[in-house]
Amino acid sequence: MQLSGFNSTSNRVFDFICLWMLPLGYLLLLCSLFFLPDRSLLHKLYYGLFSIPALIALCLRPRELKELLREPIFIAMLLFVGWALLSLCWSPGDEGFSGKIKAPLHTLMLFVGCYLLVRYRSEIVQPLLFSAAIVGLIASIYNLYTFAHVYEPGRRLIGGGAFDNPLLSSHLFGFFCAYWLSLSMTCKRPQILWLSIPAMAIMFIAVIATGSRTPLVALSLAALWLGFICWNRRSIVLLGIMLVGGASVIALFSNMIFGRGDSYRFEIWQMVLNKIAEHPWIGHGYDASLNVDPGVGYMLAEPHSFALGVLYYVGILGFIPWLFFQAWGLLSSWRHRVQPLFIIASTWLVFGIGAGLTEGGGIISRPKEHWFLLWIPLALIAALSINQRAGRLLAMPIKQLAQAALQKLTANAQVIEEDGLGPKVLRLVDGSFLKLFRRRCWYTSGSFDPYSERFAINSERLRRMGIPTPQILDLYRVKDGSSAVHYTPLPGNTLRQVLQAITAPDVRQALVERFGKFMAQLHEQGVYFRSLHLGNVLVLEDGEFGLIDVADLRIYPSSLSLSLRQRNLRHMQRYTVDHRWLFEEHFQALLQGYAVTASKSAVDNLHKQVLAANQPERAHV
């Protein structure tokens, strides 16, 4: 009993971390620099809401590490971190090992947390990115407004919040400029497109206002990557805008670009290369100090190049995994470019690679602006790659379906279900089904995660769990904003139809008992099918149960809580025929089947809920 109670508590803690804490922590990591007074508060927020919760979740469920250890990016990251910590053996630094392990551990927890977030709340990732970008946009508009009132020639925008350096500020402005640019290339809703274009322009103006040249190069590389990874009609427009915009920036801001020369970059790099040559293979050590004076009259502590920084601190042996996980991240993104999140994350990574050519140097640090150039996009790509491999993300291209093609596809089709707006489910002449999802408001979750795509993803995930679902043939996007899923139906009849056809009470009771067991299996596996009723459960030809119409379904990290089970039952109790068969005539059989898999507390809870629901009816009688 005590062990069962501990498992239940640990499951609820794990669920709370994955479903609520990690999304909040990730959102604040992305946008809080815009409004926090200093970076130390960012560190505390990240540790308390993301890093430490991710570590607790990993301790509660160590098996989650299995999938992480199969991801090449994470393996390379472990090798890089392990070698960096090993380099403390020959590093001249005097700080203890315990003090130096914190930053690598928190960096690794970014990968763990992103993996858990994408695995258990994949539908919220795009809204989180969008929300963070909106916060960055509003803050940037305010920063530009205040900057315009104090502007004088030579002055550079720093920004509010925790920003204290124009170059570091430009990393954040450029990061979200790259996001809006990616969104303008991948979004399908006109409302989102018309928002992303001016938002991108505002963030680009903020980058220019910082007077930093590095992000301009980085954004150019990101735009080139984006044009090729998407490669559609918008790519041609994007390349044209790049040519016109580049010429305009050079013409209007030539003094900013060429007036400061090379800012001693070549002198700095030459001096750092001479130091690298002293220990080319193993480097000077993770916590070694770096001091160079290229002739400016004071010492600089960074090589102004991430690649040179890695070579200086951990040598060629550390540089190999560092180079590998970036190359593999881009390769994985190219392979899975059908998924918009891969496009966004890889564009961020290309932006970071471009910015890192002439900026940065510290290889592993606490959360700050440099995280947006490497660790944040790389952790997201690794999480997406793991979950794509496991079939939890969409892997099927979405086809555009013109109105004429839709009419041809549905010619002579039988309408299975319709509403006031027209047909919803059609049986096509070849026996396959086409389910239509109407356009909804652009600001709902359906604009980021259309129900047709949810249908396809849920079908694949349920099949991997051993639950029969329809086989997806194609996904379509209709010009009027609707979406559609084309699938092969499961062979069988709905459980409601089968129960109606049974005349022998004993046979019906046995079938209800088997359904109780099936429902308990769903609940124990964390499947919350909000539309669970006898019309959405099929009895297959082999006697097994299958699910249809699975767009309205979520899979939780652990078995369902008692409250979610109650909500599931309340939905079924609304159907008169279902209620009579399941909760009146054969209720004991349902309980008996449910008890085969579910815990005693879950069975007792079901019993009490049904009795409470039936009590008013008996009192009325």
Image (cartoon, helix red, strand yellow):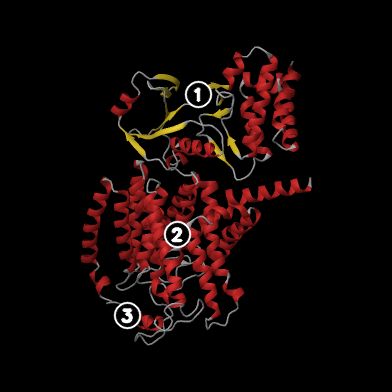
Residue visible at 45% across and 82% down in the picture = 290
Type of amino acid under label 2: Leu
Residue visible at 72% across and 20% down in the picture = 617
Q: Nearer the viewer, residue 455 or 464?
A: 464
Measured as percent of width and height from the top left, residue 371 is found at: 46, 64
Q: Which residue is mark 3?
A: 264
N-term-proximal mark, 1 vs 2: 2
Give the CA distance from mark 1 to mark 2. 43 Å
Q: Secondary structure at mark 3?
A: loop
Q: In this picture, is 481 found above or below 27?
A: above
Q: Which residue is mark 1?
A: 491
Type of amino acid under label 3: Tyr
Q: Is residue 165 left or right of residue 502?
A: left
Q: Residues within 10 Å of mark 3 (few under 14, many from 20)?
A: some
Disc number placed over residue 378 in the picture, else none: 2
Q: Is residue 31 left or right of residue 518?
A: left
Disc number placed over residue 278 in the picture, else none: none
Q: Which residue lies most toward the right here? A: 1
N-term-proximal mark, 3 vs 2: 3
Q: Is residue 482 left or right of residue 23?
A: left
Measured as percent of width and height from the top left, residue 154 is found at: 31, 74
Figure quadrant of the N terminus: top right
Type of amino acid under label 1: Pro
Q: Secondary structure at mark 1?
A: loop
Measured as percent of width and height from the top left, residue 81 is found at: 52, 68
Q: Secondary structure at mark 2?
A: helix
Q: Which residue lies most toward the top here? A: 503
Q: Nearer the viewer, residue 81 or 452?
A: 81
